[in-house]
Image: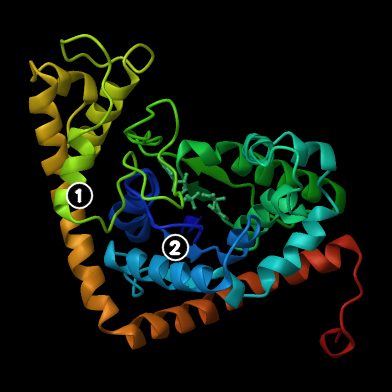
Amino acid sequence: MTRVFSGVKPTGHLTLGNYLGAMRRWVVEDQHRSDALFCVVDLHALTVDHDPARVRRLSRQAASLLLAAGLDPALCTVFVQSHVDEHARLSYVLECVATDGEMRRMIQYKEKAARERGGSVRLSLLTYPVLMAADILAYGTDEVPVGHDQTQHVELARDLAVRFNQRYGHTFVVPRATHPVVAARVMNLQEPESKMGKSDDTGPGIVYVLDEPDVVRKKVVRAVTDSGREVVYDREVRPGLANLLEILAACAGGEPAELAGAYDSYGALKKDVAEAVVEALRPVRKRHRELCADPGYVEGVLRDGAERARAMARPTVDAAYRAIGLLPPVNAAR
Ligand code: AMP
Ligand code: TRP
């Protein structure tokens, strides 16, 4: 059966971008058709300035939201990255296969490092894609369902797998990224040139999965649209409008270009987009409230998930240790 692995970083509240670009597909498709693992990648949240209590809180919240969105522990494995040592264990070995030049070429690193403006960045921000490759390769992953922003990182995981296999013998499955048909890159409603990313502020351009319906409506109605009056789908020339049409298509079905033809005003389109988003998020918010009242359930899922994940990753990581030349521990050598 196809092995699927994906993850979400607990660096902020989850957004409509996370939901449409990644999580919803995990729920609707991946967990049913594959042997899938979904991970709250908390080690990745330590690559930028962080508050320990907040990371803990957001990790718990991300796990509950994955379940609230519909991941079913009877169908897939849901767990927290730091509960499974194999990720860090494999990451070091892969660092011995990757080069510093490769790391410095990563777009996300360049963008984030540039934002620090002369200040220093954590070394882990540079090596983060290797840890991500370890997340993926430890499980013999075939497919990695992600938004477009992660394409380059999955390419790196492929490169490292191929290089390791060539040098040290076949050890890793070579994975590939998969993307949703629409909404693989949901843009910020206020700045349609930038991705709708998690952020510390309560940005008016970011719709959070847990936003109240009225907050969602307000944010959508205030979305920046482009000058011009007719509703057309053109990502280059009319990015704000295209974003709204893609969100509508992702939430309510249909093709962005065809949906455009059904509207003769921005106002009517925004109203429908707002209601489509509210309806898409409604069941997730409801289930999240229920799960918050039952923290023991979420903890149980994460405990079982970590156990299952450990058992899956261990043989591959052990094989990589042997292949690269590390002496097996004596009690396991027989
Ligand atoms: P992150 O928030 O970086 O942990 O991302 C978790 C998943 O959500 C990854 O698969 C991302 O590619 C996806 N994702 C994050 N933001 C967006 C966005 N604005 N549009 C589409 N997918 C996104
Ligand atoms: N880097 C990813 C992001 O920022 C999160 C992530 C970490 C991930 N490890 C992963 C995604 C492995 C897919 C597979 O979104």
Residue drawn at (38%, 55%), measured in percent from left and top? 14
Coloring basis for residues: rainbow
- Looking at this view, name the residue that lies furthest to the bottom: 331
In the displayed structure, does residue 168 sit left or right of residue 15?
A: right
Question: In the image, 246: left or right of 94?
Answer: left
Q: Secondary structure at mark 2?
A: strand
Picture layout, residue 76 above or below residue 186: below
Crowdedness of circle 2 by 10 Å Cα count: few (<14), some, many (20+)?
some
Residue shown at 78% from the left, 50% from the top: 165
Residue nearer the viewer, 231 or 139: 231
Evaluate whether residue 198 shows in this view: yes
Give the vertical position of 212 relative to 260 (above or below).
below
Task: Tell me the amino acid under the disc marked 2.
Answer: Asp
Q: Is residue 100 above or below residue 122?
A: above
Disc number for residue 215:
1
Rendering coords of residue 227 (x, y %): 25, 11
- Please state the horizontal and vertical placement of residue 145, each as a whole percent of the image: 45, 47
Identify the mark nearer the N-term, 1 or 2.
Answer: 2
Find out if the beta carbon at label 2 lies less than 8 Å from the nearest ligand 2 atom: no
Q: Identify the residue at horizontal 24%, vertical 30% (top origin).
A: 244
x and y percent of residue 276 in the render?
Answer: 14, 42
308 displayed left or right of 116: left
Q: In the rendered image of this protein, does residue 188 appear above or below residue 288?
A: above
Name the quarter where the C terminus is drawn: bottom right
Total numbered badges shown on the rendered structure: 2
Whether pointer 1 and pointer 2 mark residues with C-beta atoms closer than 8 Å, the reply is no
Q: Specify the label residue 35 is tagged with.
A: 2
Task: Give the foreground label among 1 and 2.
Answer: 1
Q: CA distance from mark 1 to mark 2?
A: 37 Å
Residue type at mark 1?
Answer: Val
